[in-house]
Amino acid sequence: MQRRMQNFCGSAREWYRDNVLANVPQTDSEKVEFLHANDYGDQSDYYDGGQNGQFANYQNYGGTQGGEQEANGFANANGSYAAAKFGEYEEFGDPHGGGGASSHRISEWQAGWNVTNAIQGMFVVSFPYTVLKGGYWAIISMVFFAWICCHTGKILVYCLYEPNLDGVPVRVRNSYMDIATAVWGPRWGGAVVTAAQLIELLMTCILYIVLCGDLMEGSFPDAAIGANGWMFLCAIILLSCAFLRNLQSVSFLSFWCTVAHIIINMIILTYCLSQIGSWHWGAVKLEIDIYSFPIALGVVVFSYTSQIFLPTLEGNMSKPQRFNEMLDWSHLAAAIFKALFAYIGFLTWGYETQEEITNNLPTQGFKATVNLILVVKALLSYPLPFFAATETVENCLFRGKPETPFPSWRNMDGTAKKWGLGVKMGLVVVTLIMAVVIPHFTTLMGFIGNFTGTMLSFIWPCYFHMRLKWDTLEWYIISLNVFIICLGFIIGSVGMYYSSYELYRLFNGEDIYKPPIPILITNITSVF
């Protein structure tokens, strides 16, 4: 019996090598030192790959940009992170956003471009306001959180791999949801991550509408309608998003969003530098306002949340072994730009800095011009998270019985049924209602960052990493993960508390702070 078992295992091993590992490169020149520079386990010693060979048998699913849709995915989106983050569409192959076909892979530069645009975004216009609330500590957090999110992005992708019989890591998971399912099981894993993702997407849509209302009100302060009226008009335009069928037009719009974003940032920075003679050098403080600083931290965390789409992005790279390097320089570039933009912007206006820095521009004509460009950019940015949210809702509820609770909202040709269009338009209306109910841009963004941002970017990646790779981790990596988890819990819980209190205060029209709990230290310098 023992000899039969040995023969069977030997036959299975030979079949695995001949049929599964046939395309894996074996030469030393093709070895991929995966995660070598960061020492996230023992993977660098035995990772075999190449540019495409490693994924030949595990990722050739058609990809999120597969088939005829490649031109509208990562390679040419130029600022659209939709194809990566929201890879759940029939026309793109793998519903979980797994790897693309080798002919539709992207370079590390294209991948870095997508990551950079995803973690920069138009919400950077509120960063000088975070310096008003958090002083130098807000600037430090912009750099420190970039490093943390870079680390958690790497270890999250590491969790996609498991060693085969020969100890060669192969990609056995394709998405954040797959990792959660492996840790928490199929019943809760996917549901929890999907819920967090959906909340983040819908809240992002709400933020775009709130931003449009604030910018339009700042551009036309004497208009007969206020911010709520402008938000209503913008929502009417956004109803057309219900007719989106795929990412083709969305990715094209995202390119122009990025172009507009670069132009706006250059205009603002040029103006700020022209005012260097009147900068408020003494305005940046070391004090911590316990009521506003946690909100500022939430804004920073929200701006770096990109972990959901990183597994798909890595799977579509032609050289996935360069993923870590790409993540390093993209987060470094984002950290430098955010810190400089926030610091220079705050120095220009000091304590007069507003939630959207464009509202600080000197002349009404100048302000209106820049704000209108930003409004157009916000309207063009809205379809990305909205399209992803509708696809998530469809996959969870409207794919047809008995797989989902409700019948499919699509016709046989892929177009949406009339009642399906009604549901999508209803989601637009929901985001409008929420924007009207919570018309406080920075506070809402801080709440989202402290809620879903800390879970998706801090806590869960480290927890999943330890659960799946515990036996291969060094003690200092485990210690770092535990530290990040604790930091995420502290920032998230404290930030949600004070964000909620700030929203309550704003709703009740209170102009002065009334401490909800005793605070003994509000100035960091008093510690010393």
Image: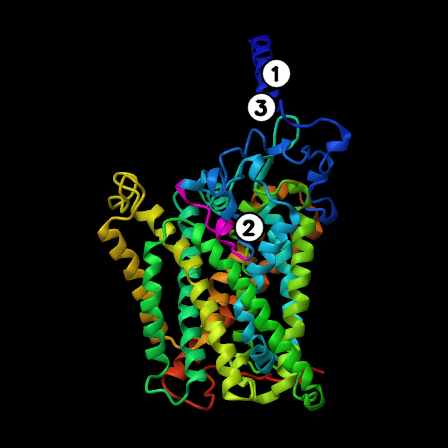
Viewer-side residue, 9 vs 212: 212
The residue shown at (58%, 30%) is 56
Q: Quadrant of the C terminus?
A: bottom right
Residue 345 screen position, x and y as percent: 62, 80
Q: Secondary structure at mark 2?
A: helix
- Amino acid at the residue labelled 1: Glu
The kind of residue tagged 3 is: Val
| Residue 348 % position (x, y) | 64, 85
Q: Residue 14: which numbered mark, if any?
A: 1
Instruction: Report if residue 85 lies within the magenta region.
Output: yes
> Is the Cβ of the residue at disc 2 closer than 8 Å to that at disc 3?
no
Residue 522 is left or right of residue 447, and the answer is right
Regarding residue 523, the answer to whether it shows in the image is: yes
Mark 2 or 1, nearer chain start: 1
Mark 1 or 3: in front is: 3
Q: Which residue is mark 2?
A: 76
Identify the image quadrant of the N terminus.
top right
* Picture coordinates of residue 260, whole percent (x, y): 54, 67
Seen from this angle, which residue lies furthest left? 419
Residues in magenta, as a range: 79-90
Whether label 2 touches label 1, CB < 8 Å: no
The CA distance from mark 2 to mark 3 is 32 Å
Hey, which quadrant is residue 316 in on the image?
A: top right
Is 457 placed above or below 260 here? above
Task: Name the amino acid type tagged 2.
Answer: Asn
Identify the residue position indicated by label 3 in the image.
Answer: 20
Local crowd at mark 2 within 10 Å, few (<14), some, or many (≥20)?
Answer: some
Query: Farthest residue in the right direction?
Result: 28
SS state under label 3:
loop
Q: Mark 3, residues whose alpha carbon is within 10 Å: few (<14), some, or many (≥20)? A: few
Q: Where is residue 297? Give x, y as percent.
A: 56, 71
Q: Nearer the viewer, mark 2 or mark 1?
A: 2
